Each structure stands twice: as structure tokens, then as C-alpha cells.
Amino acid sequence: MASFGWKRRIGEKVSKVTSQQFEAEAADEKDVVENEEGSWLHAVKRRKESLLEGCVEKSKQLKDEGASLVENKRLPNELPAFVVPTSYSHFAQRSGVHSCPSRNAVWYREAIQKWDEALQLTPDDATLYEMKSQVLMSLHEMFPAVHAAEMAVQRNPHSWESWQTLGRAQLGLGEIVLAIRSFQVALHIYPMNPEIWKEDLSWARTLQEQQKVAQKIKKCDASAEMTHFSPKSIPDYDFESDEIVAVCAAIAEKQKTVSANKTMVIVSASGTVETVTEKEDGATPPDGSVFIKAR
């Protein structure tokens, strides 16, 4: 008869072959799960890369379509440059820039719309903002042009084209000091660019000098107007002449006569009103018990 023992192992009677079979099946299942997880992660990664590539390709297509609209619908004598307001028309004549005809404004609007769609796909593309700013300047929309150029500079601070476009947009708004700074940054990035040296920065400094001269002339005109109405411009009259002395004496005599006489209104107890003119050396007024005095 077998004796009972507490320390007997549970798997003691399990065959070695069966145990090895269980272990092999468990290892196979683990490999299958790991392979499935790896395949799922790889598929997600590939799908994400595919979507990004699709967005980039679609954005590039929209950018090219917008550029084609702007370039193909421009008049032959127009240049792909910026347009400034009428106050800087001389700059436009020197640079060969012409304003946008109304018939081409529709094409420019459509190009901006395509670039906006491209920016939805690739919001960090500084080139799209820079191109949009140039077209907005052609449409004389300076505030949106400055905003688009600032976005381009934020996306790519090392792009001299973006800084140049920002300076031109600021110049269109009349912000000459800011425009000079933007042109200087563009030259710091690309010092060998003759266009920025000879056209942009040189003309901006010329405008700055003209602005200083205009402010100085305006200040001189304001000072002249104040001098015209200053007390020094009053003629020097001879206040000791006989005519002036006679007039002053007459006025003093009249004031003395008025101050020497005093007029009183006397109302009696019965309601009778009487006006009495009293002189300084005249008689005393009636007794107060009979009359009521009022001024």
C-alpha cells in the first residue's frame, strides 16, 4: 500500500514528450503574436509615410498650378516683382513694375486660392507664403502681404527671398525703417545679391532721406505759423501819445462818475416802489421803519 506524501510534485507523472510539445506550441503562439504586432506597427508606419508623401505631392501640384496661373496670365511687359502704392510710383518706374490689370486679378485670386489649399496640406512651406505675399502686393493688398511675408520668415528665417519680400511689403505700407532692417537681414544672409543692394536697400534709404527732409520742412512751417501769431508780431504802439492819454482819461472819468453814484430801489410798506440815486456826500436814506430797502 502506497504511503501518502505532501511533497509530491504535480507534474511528476506527466511525460517528458508531452511537456516538450506544450512548450513548443506556446513558443509558436508567442512568435505569431509578436509577428502580428510587428506587422501592424509596420503597416501603420507605412500608411503614415504614404499619407505624408501624398500631401507633399498634392501641395507641390497646387503650388505649380498657382505659379502657372500667375506667370501665364501676366502681360508681356510685366515682371515677376512687387508693386508699390502710388506714393512710390517712381520706384515702380525704375524697377519696371506695373500694377495688376483688372482682367488678371481673377487669375491672381485663383492662384492665391490654390496656394491656400496647398498650405492646408503643408503648413510649414515658407515658399508658399512668400509667393502669396508677392501676388497680394500685385493686388495692392499690403496688410495681407505683410502678414504672409512674416509667416514665410517665421517658417524659414534663413531664406533671403522671404526677407526681401517682407521688406518690399513693409515699404509698400510706408514702414521705411522696418523695410531697411528686412533688407539688411536679407543681405546678411546673401551678401552677394546685387538686386537688394542696388534697388531695394538703396531706394529705401533714398525714401528715408526724402522723409526726413519733408518732416524738417513741415516742422519749419509749423514754427513759422506760431511766430506769425506770437506777441512779438504785434505792432509797437506809442502809448504815451496825446490821443491815447485822452482816451484813457475819458474812460477813467466815466468809471469815477459811475462809482460815485449809488442807485437804490425803495419799496414802501404800502407797496409803492421808488428809485433813489444817492451820492456819496448826499442825504441819508429815509428811516427804515417806514420803508423797505432792496437792491
Image: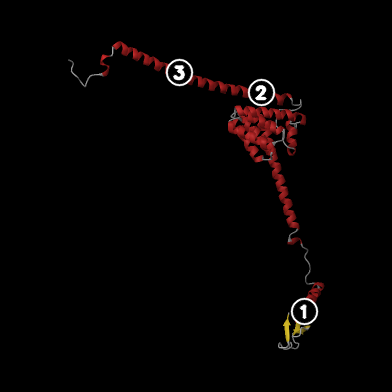
Dot label at residue 91: none
**Pointer 1: residues within 10 angstroms few (<14), some, or many (20+)?**
few
Q: Position of residue 33 (x, y in %)?
A: 42, 18
Give the Cα distance between marks 1 and 2.
97 Å
Q: Which residue is mark 3?
A: 36
Q: Which residue is mark 1?
A: 258
State which tag comes first along the sequence, 1 or 2.
2
Amino acid carrying mark 3 in the image: Glu
State which tag comes first along the sequence, 2 or 3.
3
Residue that appears at 70% across and 28% down: 110
Callout 3–callout 1 Cβ contact below 8 Å: no
Residue that appears at 72% across and 51% down: 220
Query: Which secondary structure lies at badge 2?
Result: helix
Q: Who is closer to the viewer here, 260 or 41?
A: 41
- Quarter of the image for residue 289 reads bottom right
Q: Position of residue 199 (x, y in %)?
A: 69, 33
Amino acid carrying mark 1 in the image: Val
